[in-house]
Image (cartoon, helix red, strand yellow):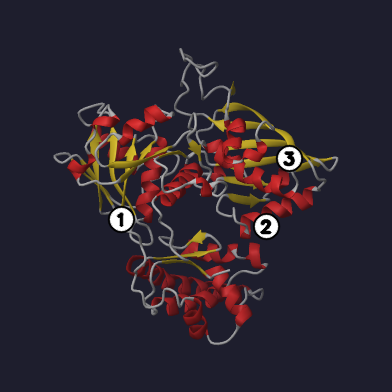
Amino acid sequence: MAEETNGTAHDQRAAWNNREELAERMVPLIGSLYRENNVITSIYGRQLVHKGVIDIIKAHRYARQIDDVVLPVEDTYPMVEALAGMNLGAASIDLGKLAAKFRTAGGELQHFLNTELAEVAGQGGEGVKAPKDVVLYGFGRIGRLLARIILSHEGGGSSLRLRAIVVRKNSEDDLVKRASLLRRDSIHGPFEGTITVDEENNTITANGTVIQVIYSNDPATVDYTAHDIHDAIVVDNTGRWRDEDGLGQHLMATGASKVLLTAPGKGDIKNIVFGVNTDDITAEDTILSAASCTTNGITPVLKVLNDEYGIDYGHVETVHAYTNDQNLTDNFHKGSRRGRAAGLNMVITETGAAKAVAKALPALKGKLSGNAIRVPTPDVSMAILNLALQKETTVEELNQRLREESLTGELRNQIDYINSPEIVSSDFVGSNRAGIVDGLATIVNGGKNAVLYVWYDNEFGYSCQVVRVIEEMAGDAVPAFPKA
């Protein structure tokens, strides 16, 4: 196995050049596997599809978090080269785990891969479900991020197809403005690809995907079939309706079959925090909620701690970025304090996230209180969990448990862990995890009182969770390798 060189400057430069060359040669192979075989490659959850050379090298360095050593590109390149020649079917392949398993198994590489991937070998890209139409009802902050994520998944391994957005027409150049907002974002940067507008047909074409823009004020009267959209999952990100009667209007539309709300649902609507209560989703469900960004940020961490130590009670204090529902300058607002200037003040406001946790994690019903402070930052929030545990622990033990979960646990796609002394909120813009534990801030008093700080990108991280729920509703899973 090749290792990082600790010799002369010349040796280190030569080693870097070699890694860079191999990563460059991997890029077209990864792209070919994705487009032609519907194979998604990653390294310990860090996706390699659509990534550049430096991103690929950094993903290999990330492997040291799990294996205590950097994963050499010299190990993975021949593996990717061999995979590209196997005419695989649809699959998700973690090269980090695969390389670790091969190191343990030994032998000849091609024989190992033939055995490990026998289920999809020679399948020629087969295995992706029939295309599933997705409609975004509303095209605000969350709607546009959902569009970006779904579009980035198209072309390999995913059956989701973004077919339409439904909005109210606000101006004669509404279509151009909607496309411009998708193209550029002050927080999340430019759209990765190309966007064109067809005003005659009311469409936006993004990276080759034609998205119909439908203007409507009434969800029940939309005829999706007029645009060849059928059996669609409608994602309501307006927040206008949150109960079964209101959201049920979408099911009255011709061509719609299921509805997902990107806000906490009321009444008996299931609030899904993907990874925690995913099994609550059934084929018969027609209306679901993806809960809130804060509920998604804290519930996975709370589940791990409750399973490991037990939680008697706790308080959640949310330090939340300002949102569109606040005023830029002091003005009337129906909510308490939210009328004051969002960019100039810290604003105490209510949150239902602590109580909402119980909808996804019933074991914590009645055990959590919560409050929120809106602060003058546009994205990335923090939840401070003050918990009374049933079992004693230490800072080191608690942090180690959460670190392990973030790397190899069932909730590794929801929980991340970091222990950098220099990290600040803007460093988490674009994080695809529901929440990130700040290990250096963890406090344990008296063995049973724990205080944890959990960062979360309340826009992008939450949107990733929403897409995971959409994929589950669509039955969009492909086999993952290596097998446990």
- Label placed on residue 404: 2
Label 1 amino acid?
Answer: Pro
Label 3 amino acid?
Answer: Ile
Spatial distance from mark 2 to mark 1, Cα to Cα?
A: 36 Å
Give percent across and percent down for residue 112: 52, 82
User: Vertically, is 314 above or below 84?
Assistant: above
Question: Which mark lies nearer to you, 2 or 1?
Answer: 1
Residue beneath the point at 63% across and 79% down: 104
Is the residue under label 3 in contact with that under label 2 (CB below 8 Å)?
no
Residue reaching furthest right? Answer: 446
Give the residue number, with chain letter if any, for mark 1.
Answer: 131
- Mark 1 or mark 2, which is nearer the start of the sequence? 1
- Mark 3 or mark 1, which is nearer the start of the sequence? 1
Give the residue number, with chain letter if any, for mark 3.
Answer: 311
Determine whether the residue tagged by mark 3 lies in a helix, strand or loop: strand
Give percent across and percent down for residue 400: 73, 54
Spatial distance from mark 1 to mark 3, Cα to Cα?
A: 43 Å
Determine whether the residue tagged by mark 2 lies in a helix, strand or loop: helix
Q: In the visual, does 370 lie left or right of 193?
A: right
